[in-house]
Image (spheres, rainbow, N blue to C red):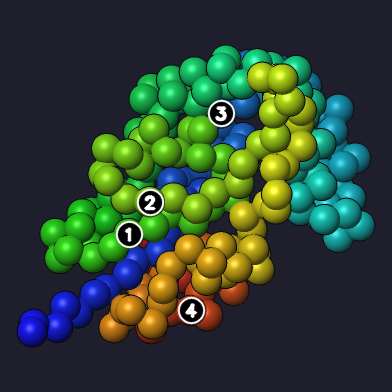
Amino acid sequence: MKVVIRHLALFDFDGTITRKDTFVEIIRYRFGTFRLLTGMAIVSPILVAYKLKLIKNWRAKEIMFGHFFKGMTAEEFKRTGEAFAKEALPKLLRPSAIQKIKEHQAAGHDIYIVTASAADWIKPWSDQFGFKILATCWETKDGVITGKIKGRNCYGPEKKVRILESIALPDYESISVYGDTSGDREMLTLATHKYYRFFKD
């Protein structure tokens, strides 16, 4: 019986595949630059506290996300994500990252995006390539966004947890991992081929 040799590629999204943080950019897309800046000013004490490591990444993220999206219906949020993925996201992509993704695809490698951003605005884009996504999910109650993270924020150690829960890594001869921040550190430890800040364009 022929042995199938499998290869895996794990990509962070924001800053790795994209040039900008899509969490910020979807707020700009939905509400405009003025609302983004005024909202950032309102939550700036929280952002400063995060920078000073006084509060956790996930909590700062909840406060910022909740300021803009809490109370929005899940259906409207879904439509916003789909529109952003179609209209705005393509302009944020790094051509060299997309080329590398295509190379992995052409070689028959399994590809996952592992991201702290929400699947709501990444999955509509990634579905066209047919690869899988591990992402942060936002809680809804009675069809309305609560502003709370559902489960855990897919960042830092949680990225590694999600990967180990979802993918049988011993089945792969090689694992290529692409990341660009300290939030990818744990994921990068899983690599047989490690690429940190690999894409420059």
* Residue 179 picture location, percent across and down: 48, 64
- 3 vs 4, front mark: 4
- Answer whether labels 2 and 1 touch (C-beta < 8 Å): yes
User: Gap between marks 1 and 4, in whole Å?
Assistant: 14 Å
Q: Which mark is residue 111?
A: 1
N-term mark: 4 or 2: 2
Circle 3 sits on which residue? 26
Q: Residues within 10 Å of mark 4 (few under 14, many from 20)?
A: some
| Position above or below: 22 against 141 | below
User: Gap between marks 2 and 1, in whole Å?
Assistant: 7 Å
Total marks placed = 4
- Answer whether labels 3 and 4 touch (C-beta < 8 Å): no
Instruction: Name the amino acid, label 1.
Output: Ile
Q: Can residue 156 be seen in this view?
A: yes
User: Gap between marks 4 and 2, in whole Å?
Assistant: 18 Å
Helix, strand or loop under label 1 = strand
- Answer whether labels 3 and 1 touch (C-beta < 8 Å): no
* Residue drawn where x is 91% and y is 57% of the image: 54
N-term mark: 3 or 4: 3
**In-front residue for pair 91/178:** 178
